[in-house]
Image: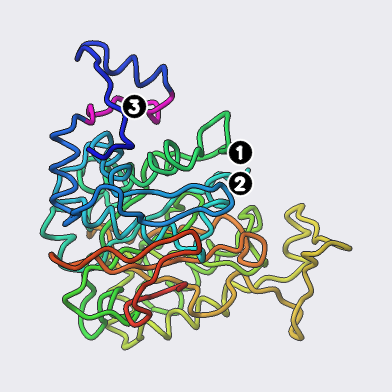
Amino acid sequence: MSAEAELLDVEEADVQERFFDEGWTDGLPIVPPTPDRVLDMLLAGGVTDPDDVLGTVPQRGIAVTAEKAAINAVMAGCRPEYFPIVLAGLGAMLDPAFNAHAATTSTGGAAVCTIVSGPLAREVGMNATHNVLGPGNRANATIGRALRLVASNVLGAKSGGLDGSSVGHPGKYTLCFAEDPPMAPWEPFGVSLGYDPDDTVVTVVATEGPRQVANHLVEDPERVLLTFAAAMKVPSNYVSGKGAQGVVVLGHEHQLAVVQAGWSRRQVQEFLAEASRITPDELRAAGIDLPVGSTHDLVPDADGKLGTVTGPDDVLVVTAGGAGAGWSAYIPMWAPVDIARSRAVSRRVRPPGEALPDCGPDGCEVDLGALGEGS
């Protein structure tokens, strides 16, 4: 343990109540972060100095160390072999482009949606198929929970405190899933971001809760994608027509429809970016007025429409979910890009022996060739 860490002498029977009383949990029981458990976590992550800084939130004067990450990963129930993924996720979450200060405190109630693409996801047993966004898989549940506990316990984003969520959603406990490698000729999501096939890539996006997308009877790729576009531009979504990012979780049957018809991932992105555009009249018909006389005025383009996403690159298409009758999901960003100043950020999981990035108060020195979306 580092000199900074505080050791508590607590009877095992009293641990849960002590942590609840101190506000160190998310409302669920935790695993006591004993020194041996924290050390095992650090060793599994290849961390030689517990005081290594993973990143900072300058607006709050806070640095997140490897030890703080390990303590919260233990509390979340992570196995040590998950910790390299947690470290990559925190590196992405603490990137200035993600804007953790806003994403973890907004009234919009954003979750840290965490997408893992690559071989390590399979090695540690992450779920990528049936019930992919639901309960039942330890790796999915605890990796996402670890990131959220760091946001709460280290960044101070607690209910009743800096977390200003008006409503929130269950994804704020944990919202983490693995990619089910797509069928050929599509490349894995991480490769589409510029990483190598052998890399495991962790992408974080500040999002609202998932919306299931159902189309059980149609195999025509354009009509299937129109169903996604309808979900993307629903006026009750805060970002509809305002220029944001969104995660398209392409389920088995819908993936079959588009890939077997010869559509590329880029064609899907371009189609959805265009088809999800919405008119001011459509927004007003749903009771949504456009801002006027503010710094965020919505001005339609020449065709009279407003973009729900800022462009094709901001439609993040990931294949996941089990075979069934034609189910997928859409997960919208919690706020428009120009308001939130937040974007999806990706980080490669460090292989054994590779040092952590050098992080200081102004950010981290990271190999720009290894960065993906939003970096």
Residue type (three-letter) at the residue carrying disc 3: Leu
Classified by dominant secondary structure, the portion drawn in magenta counts as loop
Q: Quadrant of the N terminus?
A: top left
Question: Label 2 belongs to which residue?
Answer: 106
User: Contact (CB < 8 A) between labels 2 and 3?
Assistant: no
Q: Assess disc 1: are there few (<14), some (14-19) or many (≥20) residues with their C-alpha within 10 Å of its C-alpha.
A: some
- Kindly report the distance in space between the C-alpha atoms of the residues bearing marks 2 and 3: 23 Å
Q: With respect to residue 158, does 90 lie above or below?
A: below
The residue under the point 31% across, 28% down is 6
Given the current orientation, which residue lies at the most extreme bottom position? 262
Check contact, mark 1 vs mark 2: CB within 8 A: yes
Which residue does the numbered mark 1 point to in the structure image? 164
In space, the residues marked 1 and 2 are separated at their CA atoms by 5 Å
| Among the 4 quarters of the image, the one containing residue 30 | top left
Q: Position of residue 316 (x, y in %)?
A: 42, 70
Place of residue 140 in the rendered image (x, y in percent of width and height, measured from the top left): 25, 48
Which label is found at residue 147? none
Q: In the picture shown, does residue 369 fall above or below 306?
A: below
Q: Earlier in the sequence, mark 1 or mark 2?
A: 2
Task: Give the camera-side residue of 86 and 204.
Answer: 86
- Residue 339: say if magenta: no
Relative side of 317 to 226, left or right: left
Residue 199 occupies which quadrant of the picture? bottom left
Q: Residue at x 44, y 43 (%)?
A: 151
Badge 2 or badge 3: first in the primary sequence: 3
Q: Secondary structure at mark 1?
A: loop
Helix, strand or loop at mark 2: loop
Which residue carries the number 3 mark? 28
Tell me where the magenta segment starts and ends, as one range. Answer: 23-33
Colouring scheme, one of rainbow, by chain, secondary structure, one colour: rainbow
In the picture, which quadrant includes the C terminus?
A: bottom left
Image vertical order of residue 101 relative to residue 226, above or below: above
